[in-house]
Amino acid sequence: MQSLAYYSRGENAASIQSIREAAAIAEAGGNISSAIFYLCRMAYSLLVHGKLHEVIQVIEHATLLGNTPIGLPHAMVGWAYIVHSAVLREWNRLDEALKLALQAVRLNEQTETIVSLYLGYTVLMRVYLARGEMDAARSAFQHAEAALTKTYGQYRLDAFLIVEWVQFWLVSGAPNRAIHWAQELAEQPSVPSPIGP
C-alpha cells in the first residue's frame, strides 16, 4: 500500500523501491504468490516509465520463482507473461510477444484469474494489431470485454475499457465509432461517482 501512496504522489522511484522491498520480504518469507505479484507490479511500474531492460530482469526473476517443481507455472506467472509480452511488442518482437500473450491467456483461463485474463487479452489484442491481424485483434478485444463483464459493474467496466475501445476503433479504421461514442458521452447527464461526492 505504501507503494501506491508514493505512486499517487508522483514519487515513482520511492514507489518502485517500496515494491522491491515488499517483493524481497515476501520471497524471503516463502510467500511465492505475493513475491510474484510484487515483482510484476514493479515490472509494470518500470514499463510505464520506459525502463524496458529492467522490466525484463524483474519479469525473468518472477517467472523463475513461479516455476513449480513439476514444471507447471504458478498461477501468478500469467501477470509476468503479460508484462513481458508488452515489452516484446514495444521492441517489435511480435512472434515472441504473441507466444507469451497466448501463454498468459491460457494460464489465466485455466486459473480463472479474471483481471489477469482481461489484461492478457488486451495485450494479445495489441500484439495482433501490431501484426495487422484485425479479426484476431477484434476477437481478443471481445474476449477482454467478456472477462471484465463477469466481475465488474458497468461503471468499473467502462473505466477499464474506455482507452481500449478508442484505441481499437482508431487503429481498426473506425474513427467515426470513436467520435460517435464521445458525442454520446458528452450528451449524457452527469452521474455522481459511486466512490466520491
Image: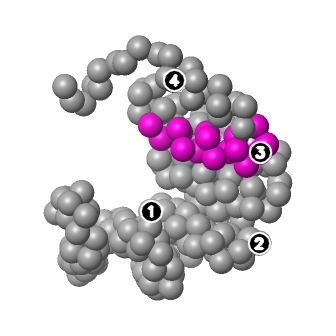
Q: Which residues are magenta?
A: 159-174
The quarter of the rendered structure image containing the N terminus is: bottom left
Tags 2 and 3 touching, CB below 8 Å? no
SS category of the residue bearing label 1: loop
The residue under label 2 is: 95
Which marked residue is nearer to the observer: mark 1 or mark 2? 2
Inter-mark Cα distance, 3 to 1: 32 Å
The quarter of the rendered structure image containing the C terminus is: top left
Inter-mark Cα distance, 4 to 2: 37 Å
Q: Which mark is residue 6?
A: none
Identify the amino acid type marked 1. Met
The residue under label 3 is: 172
Identify the amino acid type marked 2. Asp
Residue 4, magenta (yes or no): no
Residue 73: image x %, image y %?
Answer: 53, 69
The residue under label 4 is: 185
The residue under label 1 is: 76
